[in-house]
Amino acid sequence: MRRRARAASAIALTLALAGPLAPVAAQAMPAAQARTAGGSQSVSTARVLTIPGTVNARDTGGYRTYDGKTTRWGVLYRSESLSKIPPEGVTALGNLHLGSAIDLRTPTEVQADGTDRLPTGVASVPQPVDDTSLFAFIGQVVRSKDPVYQQAMLGDGKAEERMRTLYRGFVTNSGNRAALGAAIRTVANSTKPVLFHCSAGKDRTGALADTILRAVGVPATTSESDYLLSNQLRAASDQALRDQVKAAGYMQNPDLLIPLQEVRSDYLDAFRDQAVHDYGSFGAFLTDGLGLDVSTLTRLRGRLVG
């Protein structure tokens, strides 16, 4: 029994690195209150949704565009995995009146973590974006219980470089570009609210959110602030995970995991810079890289900006 319990703990710890483990409740206003706040960008947590079982679910509304308009509330949401939310979380999702939920996780992640728990009538739209085997890599390193190996794999900037490689791959991998482009078309063509997510709701989700917000005219600095909000929202659950990893004897120095748990401006820069390097400009990345035509981009802005 004890051996089985240890094995189950190892699996749980591995999965938690890609998504929340027993998430700590975020201190945030409910979505209804957020929309009465007038979309203030100075109160970032006002956009956080109260979805039991999540810490990083939020509305992309309320961001000012270059031409003085604002992204609409209640149209596009982002979150972490929905595979472990309790029944009351499913009920809360139902209150968003979603038409679809775009799942950016790979089949390996879905198999290990489970399919989304969605309200009846919400379509699950799989658009897997390659995680460069990060999910498996983290599990391998943590389960080794070898501090020397863990330092060699994650220390001295290696974890950070692996994350930058992940972000560059969102651009250089043709399958990733196809998935991101298809996800954006789903948003543009939907007549109901859409939610998109990966595992932790920070990297693939963050890159897609950045692309969409910038595509509809939100300044890059504002979009970056939305991206970095994941650190604030995930801080407590990420710390709890590191504490569990150490207490269970998997890592002597769980802080080696911090670069993998956090989002950072230089990770986002790796994504943005790769797009410009490969396609010449952000606009060309949208059209030539992601395969989005002008009519799709026009519909996207019409859906999200009012």
Image (cartoon, helix red, strand yellow):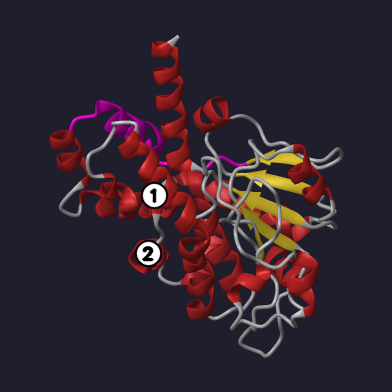
Q: Secondary structure at mark 1?
A: helix
For residue 119, which quarter of the picture?
top right
Q: Which residue is rendered at x = 61% and y = 42% of the image?
A: 127
Q: Which residue is rendered at x = 42% and y = 33% of the image?
A: 13
Give residue 145's position: percent from left, percent from top.
Answer: 24, 29
Report the span colored magenta. Answer: 127-146
Going by the image, does 165 lie left or right of 103? left
Q: Which residue is mark 1?
A: 169
Q: Which mark is residue 304?
A: none
Q: Which residue is rendered at x = 55% and y = 54% of the image?
A: 205
Q: Residues within 10 Å of mark 1 (few under 14, many from 20)?
A: many
Going by the image, does 223 lie left or right of 85? left
Q: Earlier in the sequence, mark 1 or mark 2?
A: 1
Q: Looking at the picture, which amino acid does disc 2 mark?
A: Arg
Q: Is residue 203 visible?
A: no
Q: Secondary structure at mark 2?
A: loop
